Amino acid sequence: MADSKNHKCDESALRLAVEHLGQGIAVFNQDRLLDMSNDQFQTILDLPGSLCVGGTSLADVVRHLAERGDYGEGDVAELAQARLDEIERNSSGHLERSGPNGQYLEVRTHRLPNEGLVISYTDISARVAAERELAQVNQSLEKRVQERTKALTHLNTELERARAKADAANLDKTRFLAAASHDLLQPLNAARLYTSTMVERAHGTDLARLAANVDDALVAVEDIMSALLDISRVDSGALKPSISAFSIRELLKKVKVEFEPAATAKDINLRLVGADAMVSTDRRMVARVLQNLVSNAIKYTAKGGAVLVGCRKRGNRIRLDVIDNGIGIDKDQHSLIFTEFSRLEPGARIAQGLGLGLSIVQRFGQALNLDVELDSVPGRGSRFSIYLPPAADAPPPPPAKAATPPQHGGSMQGKQILCVDNEPDILEAMKALLDGWGCDVRVARSLKQISQLDLLEGWVPDIVLMDYHLDQSSGLDAIQWLRQTVGGHLPAILITADRSAQVQNLAEERNVSLLPKPLKPAALRALMSRLD
């Protein structure tokens, strides 16, 4: 009696629990007759009450659903039997199908140990709707990603075309500037030679200042052209660093030859010290940096001042310094002076220019991965420094030679000079300049003309001044022929508007000094004095 009462209590508790589930639950016995179901079972399947009472056959429920069309179109008996077979075949089944009121149902079947059967129905319409919405969002997002990727691909293609076009334009610009600079530097070189001759001959006359002004204007044109060509070559990538080991001393020798005349003209003491270090970088680019720094130092240092160029070891690097006691630069303006066409007011009043020199210094420093440093005090002077890597396993520097007094002002009287250039105007201007120095000058446009005019008959030049671009041969080949012809060592200076590393390397290999066009007469005279 107690067991029967407990059983009824358990059954009541089970029914109560099943009623509170969010699923429709139906339990069938081994004969597939309904033992128990909850209200959700009737509601979700929208069944008539007669099919939800105990003892209802599972077959009757399935047939009702088939007749209503829950299993799709077809023969009702066949659809109902197929569903019953599927239930009996699977001990645990799961399917998803549409419900009677447009909802979406998840149907699960599970066989009990006593061969009974539990069937649950869950309304998953919200989940399915969310999944469909998410799928649509994903599809839309994927479409947008594809469209965006296509647009970015198109943009990248256009940018690549634009970059290639810009690179080609830069290369064309560099080639044009290289060709144009050679063609422009030729007449500019002749003009510089003529004006230098005028300056010397007009000394002490009313024309002296006029001649000096014309020469200064031509110097400004030369500086601008050289700067623009350097900037163009760096920016276009046409100027590739060529790393080699070299001595700072050799670099400073050329600085002394090039700038000592300008320093002397302003009564500036140009000192070069501490130059025994061997470094490893691009020699010509460093030389160009040094030229710009020394030129600025002399330009912005007052008459009677001093400029010091030297190097010292700093950690594992060599610091190359250019120090002056000129006008100095305010600290707030340090970054401005490295910008193109930037000229500060004090400097603009002292010297002419476009403000390109320090822009080249910065560009070359970046191209060589060298640090450029500035320390300056207004009214007291400036120190510009570049940090160079030392050469690995560098050979010991050669012993320092005894200092010799500068010979840039030495007498050229009676020096036998052979000038070879394919431009008649340059030959005429060069002859006028050298005649003014008291030289014995002979000129020719080619080796062939030297032979035709018998210029070497009973006459041996002390120095040859040779253009690089001749009509029949290069100037270096012409110098080699002349050395073989006259015998022995023949001092020679190659004068060219070609600033390429190839020409400079060839000149060094053949022991030929080199001066760039437009030619600076003071630098030419200083170099000729050294070669004598």
Image (cartoon, rainbow, N blue to C red):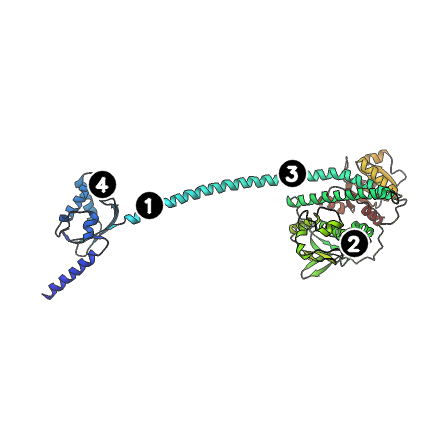
Q: What is the secondary structure assignment of the residue under circle 1? A: helix
User: Residue 269: percent from the left, percent from the top?
Assistant: 81, 56
- Which residue appears at 85% of the width and 51% of the height? 407
User: Residue 230: percent from the left, percent from the top?
Assistant: 69, 45
The residue labelled by disc 1 is 132
The residue labelled by disc 3 is 172
Q: CA distance from mark 3 to mark 2?
A: 42 Å
User: Residue 120: percent from the left, percent from the top?
Assistant: 22, 52
The residue labelled by disc 4 is 72
Dot 3 or dot 2: first in sequence order is 3
Q: CA distance from mark 1 to mark 4?
A: 22 Å
Residue located farthest toward the left when viewing the structure as drawn:
1
| Three-letter residue code for mark 4 | Gly
The residue labelled by disc 2 is 302
Question: Is 3 displayed left or right of 351 in the figure?
Answer: left
Question: Is 114 displayed left or right of 307 in the figure?
Answer: left
Dot 1 or dot 2: first in sequence order is 1
Task: Report if the CB atoms under discs 2 and 4 are less than 8 Å apart.
Answer: no
| Three-letter residue code for mark 1 | Arg
| Three-letter residue code for mark 3 | Asp
Question: Is 226 displayed left or right of 445 in the figure?
Answer: left
Comparing 517 with 148, the one in front is 148
User: Residue 495: percent from the left, percent from the top?
Assistant: 78, 42
- The quadrant of the image that shows the N terminus is bottom left
